[in-house]
């Protein structure tokens, strides 16, 4: 086979493959690399697309009988960037039509084998890292779930101390347990006992992951008076915990969730 057997469809296919592999290449630099005198190309300065330029370039090389340059384009410019088997097969067909020398054919086959190996290695490494990443994410998720279980299984009982006064949030009464009982500041009962009558303290609280602050003694939560309570100056009180996220009486959004701001 010879250059005369190179059809227009083959020229178009080679131009398409070349345009894919030369997206960032400057046209004159490509001509220099291919040992083409760009001054003989009256279309190089035209404002045409890369695909049109490569189409005219390949047509010019065919018309001027520069088979070696076309073989060079196939084996060195196009082949290294091919990723799909179908495109490689199409390129091999063009190389056969051109009748490139044995060295070019051998180089092309070696390049294809190396490309296949590289693709396999890339896929293997990518798969390995994806599996590794998935395993790490699973372990993190598992640790967090176990950590949450431990915290819930053995919750920390804490006092809420005011920085300015050094006193703690207290439930009115000794101890205070009932729904609607207001909260106040009082001397901290860090011994775990009421300082006046030695009853169990009502100053210990549990901070739940859902944002509720639950009283250890009564099992009730800090609540804003009202359903819901929003206004400045609204007092705080004990109330049944609305862990469903809704007020138990009228279904409004709960006002018992709290966020700690650092």
Image: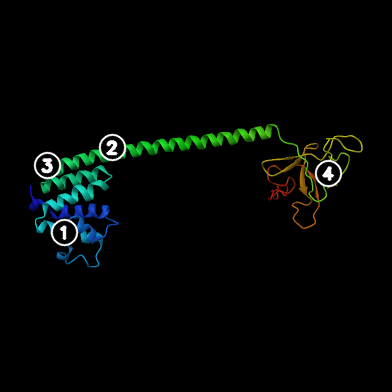
Disc with the residue nearer the chain's start (1 vs 2): 1
Say few, some or many: other residues with alpha carbon within 10 Å of mark 1 (under 14 / 14 to 19 / 20 or more): some
**Considering depth in this image, is 139 or 248 the residue closer to the camera?**
139
Q: Position of residue 176 (x, y in %)?
A: 85, 41
The residue carrying mark 4 is 170
Residue at position x 78%, y 41% in the image:
159
Q: Nearer the viewer, mark 1 or mark 2?
A: 1
Q: Indicate the secondary structure of the residue bearing disc 2.
A: helix
Marks 3 and 2, Cα distance to the nearest angstrom? Answer: 22 Å
From the viewer's perspective, is 118 left or right of 192? Answer: left
The residue carrying mark 3 is 102
The residue carrying mark 1 is 36
Disc with the residue nearer the chain's start (3 vs 1): 1
Marks 1 and 4, Cα distance to the nearest angstrom? Answer: 90 Å
Mark 4 touching mark 2, by CB under 8 A?
no
Q: Indicate the secondary structure of the residue bearing disc 1.
A: loop
Marks 3 and 1, Cα distance to the nearest angstrom? Answer: 23 Å
Mark 1 touching mark 2, by CB under 8 A?
no
Mark 3 touching mark 1, by CB under 8 A?
no
Say few, some or many: other residues with alpha carbon within 10 Å of mark 4 (under 14 / 14 to 19 / 20 or more): many
Furthest residue to the right? Answer: 196
Say few, some or many: other residues with alpha carbon within 10 Å of mark 3 (under 14 / 14 to 19 / 20 or more): few
């Amino acid at each position: 086979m010879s250059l005369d057997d190179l059809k227009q469809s083959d020229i178009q296919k080679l131009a398409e493959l070349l345009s894919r592999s030369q997206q960032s290449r400057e046209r004159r630099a490509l001509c220099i690399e291919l040992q083409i005198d760009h001054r003989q190309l009256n279309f190089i300065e035209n404002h045409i697309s890369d695909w049109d330029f490569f189409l005219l370039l390949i047509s010019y090389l065919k018309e001027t009988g520069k088979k070696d340059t076309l073989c060079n384009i196939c084996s060195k410019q196009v082949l290294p960037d091919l990723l799909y088997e179908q495109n490689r097969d199409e390129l091999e067909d063009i190389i056969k039509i051109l009748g490139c020398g044995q060295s070019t054919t051998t180089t092309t086959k070696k390049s294809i084998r190396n490309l296949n190996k590289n693709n396999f290695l890339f896929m293997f490494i990518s798969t390995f890292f994806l599996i590794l990443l998935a395993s790490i994410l699973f372990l993190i998720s598992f640790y967090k779930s176990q950590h949450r279980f431990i915290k819930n299984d053995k919750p920390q009982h804490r006092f809420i101390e005011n920085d300015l006064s050094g006193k703690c949030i207290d439930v009115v009464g000794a101890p205070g347990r009932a729904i609607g009982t207001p909260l106040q500041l009082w001397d901290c009962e860090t011994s775990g006992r009421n300082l006046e009558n030695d009853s169990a303290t009502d100053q210990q609280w549990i901070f739940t992951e859902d944002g509720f602050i639950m009283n250890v003694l009564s099992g009730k939560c800090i609540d804003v008076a009202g359903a819901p309570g929003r206004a400045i100056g609204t007092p705080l009180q004990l109330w049944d915990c609305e862990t469903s996220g809704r007020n138990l009486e009228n279904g409004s959004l709960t006002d018992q969730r709290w966020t700690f701001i650092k």
